[in-house]
Image (cartoon, grey):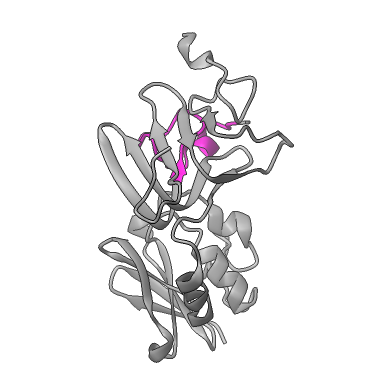
Amino acid sequence: MSRDQSFSGGRKYSNDEITVYWKPSACIHASYCYRELLEVFDPGRRPWVDMKGASTEKIIETVNMCPTEALTWKWNEEAKNQPVGSDQSNHIRFRRPELLAQDANAPEENPVTIKIMNDGPIVLKGDFSLAYSGINKDFREAIVSICRCGASEHQPFCDGQHRKIGFIG
Amino acid sequence: MEETKSGKSKTIIEVIDSGPLKITGNIVLKDFKRDKEIPMGEVLLCRCGKSSDKPFCDGSHKNK
């Protein structure tokens, strides 16, 4: 079942297991959602989210790639929700409980995954410290997108400009 | 490389003003377009879009 309902600040979409929350004002058009999972996230369709398009696991994986709080998700069964990684005060991500248990046994510092997206940004994922413009910030279980085309208006972060300028790289 | 309280190495990422992204530490790099060797220790990634050795910096940002 796929429902499309409003909540304060956006819309929410549910299947039998989870609800995905979309806050359009927070979207920076990093475009991981529809690049990773067009079957669910299709900007050209109304409603643009179809919760029947993929498995719950795949939807969670894709929503977790969202570099801002534009896309978040929760289990429908409230007791299963356990907040993790609240480095952004208004952004609480939820994980499957079995993954949380794995994290507890994992070494404190995991390798940081650096993804170079096709014609897109550098995506940093994991635990790291980031220094930019005189700021030094520790990130934990974070996903941060860094501009690679040089055209972002929110440097050093990606704001989706690479698509507008037709960046190839 | 900075050591954390647990003694494990910490990954440090530095955005160099008008320059590349400098990454030092324990990383896994995945380039979806190219098959490039991952240098150990320190990586400099292009941020200006002009490098001819993408995803790495080749100093092209200095040329106007």
**What is the magenta range?**
A145-167
Residue A12 picture location, percent across and down: 42, 75
| Quarter containing the N terminus of chain A | bottom right
Residue A19 x, y percent position in the rendering: 46, 79
Direction from residue A8 to residue A75 in the image, left or right: right
Image x and y of residue A126, in percent: 47, 54
The kind of secondary structure the magenta stretch mainly shows is: loop
- Looking at the image, residue A18 lies above or below residue A145: below
Residue B25 rendering spot, x and y as whole percentages: 49, 41
Is residue A3 something one can see in this rendering? Answer: no
Task: Report whether A84 appears left or right of A88.
Answer: right
Q: How many marks?
A: 0
In this view, A68 is above or below A41? above
Name the quarter where the C terminus of chain A is drawn.
Answer: top right
Q: Residue furthest front?
A: B7
Q: Nearer the viewer, residue B27 or A12?
A: B27
Q: Which residue lies at the image location 52% right of the left edge and 36% below the top edge?
A: A162
Q: Is residue A59 magenta?
A: no
Q: Nearer the viewer, residue A83 or B40?
A: B40
- Residue A40 drawn above or below residue A2: above
Q: Is residue A4 visible?
A: yes
Residue at the (45%, 29%) spot, across then down: A151
Q: Residue at 39%, 90% (x, y): give it.
A: A79
Which of A160/B59 is in front?
A: B59
Q: Residue furthest right?
A: B35
Q: Nearer the viewer, residue A118 or A110?
A: A110
Instruction: Judge left or right: residue A59 versus residue A29.
Output: right
Residue A164 lies in the magenta stretch? yes
State the residue at coordinates (61%, 37%): A119
